[in-house]
Image (tube, helix red, strand yellow):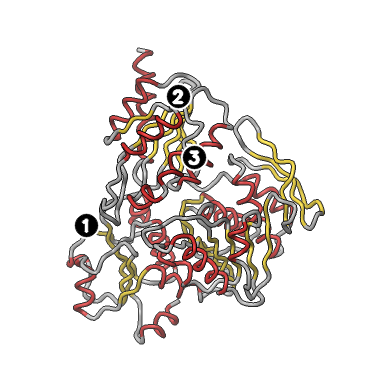
Amino acid sequence: MKTILEKEFGKKINKLYFVGIGGTSMSGLAGIAQDMGFEVAGCDMMDSLYVQKLKNRGIPISIGHDENNLPDDTDLLVFSAAISDEKPEMVKAKKLGIPRIERSDYLGLLSRVFETTIGVAGTHGKTTTSSMIAQLLTQAELDPSVSIGGRLDEIGGNAHLGKNEYFVVESCEFVDSFLKTQHQIGVITNIEKDHLDYFTGGLKQIMQSFHRFGMILPKNGLMVAWGDDTIVRNVCLGLKCPVVYYGFKDNNDWTAKNVEFNEFGNPSFDLYHKDEFYDHFELQIPGRHNVLNAMAAVIVADHLGVDKELIKHSLKDFKGAHRRFEFRGEVDGINVYEDYAHHPTELRVVIESALNHDHNKLWVVFQPHTYSRTKLLFREFIDSFKGADEVILNDIYSDREANTYNIYSEDLAKYIKRDYNIPTVVMSEFEQIVKYLTDNLKPGDLVLVAGSQTINKVAFMLVDALKEKKEGSEV
């Protein structure tokens, strides 16, 4: 990597500084950089689990932005897409002539280090699918390097520097980041409208970007794509490399049949390849959507020569990436889960997964993310709550745009109540949400806390509050 960076910038690169180092991807890249022998430091607006893990590795991290955070002898500044040129560290770097590189460009250079980069793209399912692939290759002793958008126990976090040729990357379409990596195997899990603050051309522009993602693959590469959707199939037309389709329909190369669910909503299924039985699989993560995620992982692992029995047992052992319908605790028969869902399809799917789990009433706590997504996918959000018994909405969280859309969580609540007759309230404070839940939950209820940002704290706070309430009643 040092040679690639030195060639790119025409100078020796040893000291890296990450602005926004606490981000899911940035923290992983910082850890990999340290493992590669770079001297690493950084800053972020707030403390977090990722920040603490990097500090525990000895990486100095400043909380807040200040020009004094950036050492004068820094060789290269890496910044995330959310960082503006006005941030003090960015201004100082420009003044001192320190080269700057955006996260996705840095990741693109990193991908050149490896012989086989596996890019997992899609509007939904990227983290779970890339995590499954990472676990499969790790357990097959292929020791892949990994950069994913969630924490995976198998690699001890969200990133890992391996010793072999493979690099598993979660490829995000936002601001066309996934067009920077040089991948040899690609996965497209699905394609829908999202990130419409960037993709102002709507679905047409999104499809064009995914096609360009596929065109990066060389002739001897492989595209693994969800074949049940005509949008995905149209995107894959004209690619240079072979395309393998998977799904539930019979016109795919790989097909899942006889899908069944246990009392926890966890699926089992028979997998067929070219109409021939491949094997029977059991998962311990819920939802029909995870059958598709598992299929994509199987195809990639099979293509790389991983033993079928190992694939089968690895997927059965897969407990999921953190924050994907993750169990947070049970108190007096009340089960609390949290999920990263922030798009209406993700929300609908995780609610369906929760409905497959034995429960009395399903309570959904949701924090919308970005005004543009809430406004432009408003109808889809309303419909995604179908099946919930009670809904609590937190205020819309937006870290990259102003509310020029004049949209509020109260607007969602109005139509959820009107169209589905689901009791829905809006609460701004996490403490208020937790008190409301502890006052109203009954044994057998299931609580799903959903959203991509800070709302996950409610799940932990709620479990603690329920335990405290139980202990108080036993005194």
Kindly identify which numbered label has been placed on residue 331: 2
Closer to the camera in the image, 45 or 237: 237
Residue at position x 35%, y 23% from top?
468
Residue at position x 65%, y 44% from top?
316
Can you say whether 234 is above or below 275 in the image? Answer: below
Amino acid type of disc 3?
Glu
Closer to the camera in the image, 366 or 52: 366
Q: As drawn, is 117 to the left or to the right of 24?
A: right
For the C terminus, the quadrant is top left
Q: CA distance from mark 2 to mark 1?
A: 38 Å
For the N terminus, the quadrant is bottom left
Residue 20 place in picture, x, y as percent: 31, 61
Which is nearer the N-term, disc 2 or disc 1? Answer: 1
Q: As drawn, is 326 to the left or to the right of 410?
A: right
Can you say whether 277 is above or below 329 in the image? Answer: below
Kindly identify which numbered label has been placed on residue 64: 1
Kindly identify which numbered label has been placed on residue 337: none
**Which residue matches tag 3?**
326
Q: As drawn, is 291 to the left or to the right of 88?
A: right
Q: Quadrant of residue 184?
A: bottom right
In the displayed image of the protein, which residue is found farthest to the front?
418
Q: Quadrant of residue 164?
A: bottom right
Amino acid type of disc 2?
Val
Does dot 1 land on a helix, a strand or a loop?
Answer: loop
Residue 196 place in picture, x, y as percent: 40, 58
Does dot 3 land on a helix, a strand or a loop?
Answer: strand
Residue 101 place in picture, x, y as percent: 34, 74
Which is nearer the N-term, disc 3 or disc 1? Answer: 1
